[in-house]
Image (cartoon, helix red, strand yellow):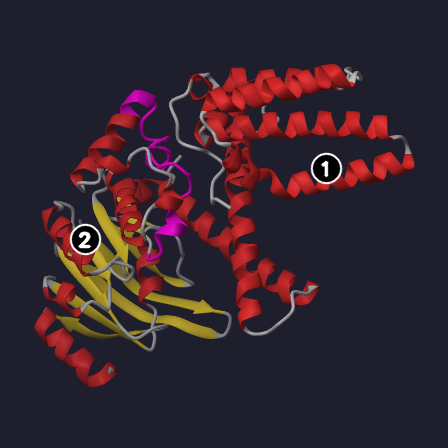
Amino acid sequence: MNAAFYVVGQSPIHRLPAGRKLATLALAGAALMWVHQWQFLCLALVLVLGLLALSGVTFRQLLIQVRLLGWFILALGAYSAWAESPALALEMMLRMSTLVIAAQLVSMTTPLTQMMTVVEKVLAPLDRLGWVRAERVALACGLTLRLIPELALQWQDIREAQAARGLKPGVLTMLLPMLLRTMRRAEELAEAIDARSSG
Amino acid sequence: MLIQFKNVFVHRDARVVLSGINLSLTEQRIGIMGPNGSGKSTLIRLINGLLLPHSGQILVDGRDTRQDVRAIRRSVGFVFQNPDNQIVFPIVHEDIEFGLKHREPDAATRRARARVALEQLSIGHLADRLTHTLSGGERQLVALAAVLATEPELLVFDEPTTQLDLRLRNHFARVLSTLHQPTIIVSHDFELMQTMQRVLVIRDACLAFDGAPGQALAWYREHCA
């Protein structure tokens, strides 16, 4: 697991403006909801995998990031096949896999600050109306994305530390240190941002 | 730059963290030493308003940290002990540019200033690297570059050499000697403290010694070892 989604590169996908990538992802996501033929869904998945290859992001790098979600999609598919039908399960799994890989592709080829700039621009009209502070919302979104992989690393650290002490992972032994470390990390991050900002 | 502490008290819950600190700092290189938990880090966090005193006053060039914190933070650069706490964004140049956002509206100029700061520390080659792939020492230098890019009038360091190996520590000491800004450094690094003009020793929340480095280190060895 990396402590960041972004993969450094100079591919055409990397060079696309962040706004265009995010808008395409949103439109493609909405469009896929209307597609029910597995052949077309397969085609969409192949297309996304083709874009992944074009971006220079390796399949292994992708797998590291989406492994957990992959298991989740499989479990959901198994349940759907049992509760509804195998055809519906296949459709759902193809759709979700395509969306997850497409979203991951955007995260892995777009620097965080570019995504934050897009959020800021999208929210600018609401900012002008005084409804939201666009810059703060963008920073919150950016930090959330930034910290997801870090939290996963933290979880791994705690699990290793507990294992080294001969403790089995449990709700209390894992969640309590996780909560405390996350709160401490949040405090440190807030302090660092305070120290560096003057706006 | 003149920094004044006027009868400063800081408490944390029922514990006194700093007690009755009175100081006037004008030297170019000031070191702060003291046992763990003595209040050193608290003292330097008061300078740029990261912490406010429970009583007393801190003035940075005549500006009160209670009333003028934004202007003070603009002029005081703070380098944290753990660079991971300071580095917010995943790409080196992105992180440095983030600190310039409110100071420089033009993105190209921000990027240029980030490059200059990295080059100043001879780490220009790290600009496009992911921060989590850097070594601890490289991260410490990136954290310093992020602060230098903001062109502060005063630099405050919280134990900057703790995570550095000997080579990087020496590189850091060389960099430090080239900085034109006044610097205040909290450190346990005796060799580094020898290069200061004035060294303060904080013990049990109080200013226990204030003087030349040689005398301060001798006092520290005698009373705090």
Image vertical order of residue B106 relative to residue B174, above or below: above
**Residue A126, visible in the rendered structure:** no
Image vertical order of residue B192 relative to residue B59, above or below: below
Element on which disc 1 rests: helix
| Residue type at tag 1 | Ile
**Which disc, if any, is residue A121?**
none
Q: Quadrant of the rendered structure where residue A9 is? A: top left
Q: Residue at x 58, y 25 (%)?
A: A130
Is B97 in the magenta? yes
Give the residue pinned by disc 2: B183
Are the residues flagged by discs 1 and 2 from a single subunit?
no
In the rendered image, residue A170, in percent from the top left (x then y), is placed at 68, 65
Q: Residue at x 68, y 66 (%)?
A: A172
Q: Residue at x 16, y 69 (%)?
A: B190
Is B160 in the magenta? no
The residues colored magenta run B81-110
A30 and B15: which is toward the camera: A30
Q: Quadrant of the rendered structure where residue A96 is? A: top right
In the rendered image, residue A59, in percent from the top left (x then y), is placed at 53, 32
In the rendered image, residue A10, in percent from the top left (x then y), is placed at 38, 22
Q: Residue at x 50, y 23 (%)?
A: A53
| Residue type at tag 2 | Thr
In the rendered image, residue A137, in percent from the top left (x then y), is placed at 55, 32
Q: Quadrant of the rendered structure where residue A74 is? A: top right
**Residue A165, visible in the rendered structure:** yes
Element on which disc 2 rests: strand
**Which disc, if any, is residue A73?**
1
Write down the chain letter for disc 2: B
B123 and B117: which is toward the camera: B123
Write down the chain letter for disc 1: A
Q: Nearer the viewer, mark 1 or mark 2?
A: 1
- What's the distance in space between the residues labelled 1 and 2, CA to CA? 54 Å
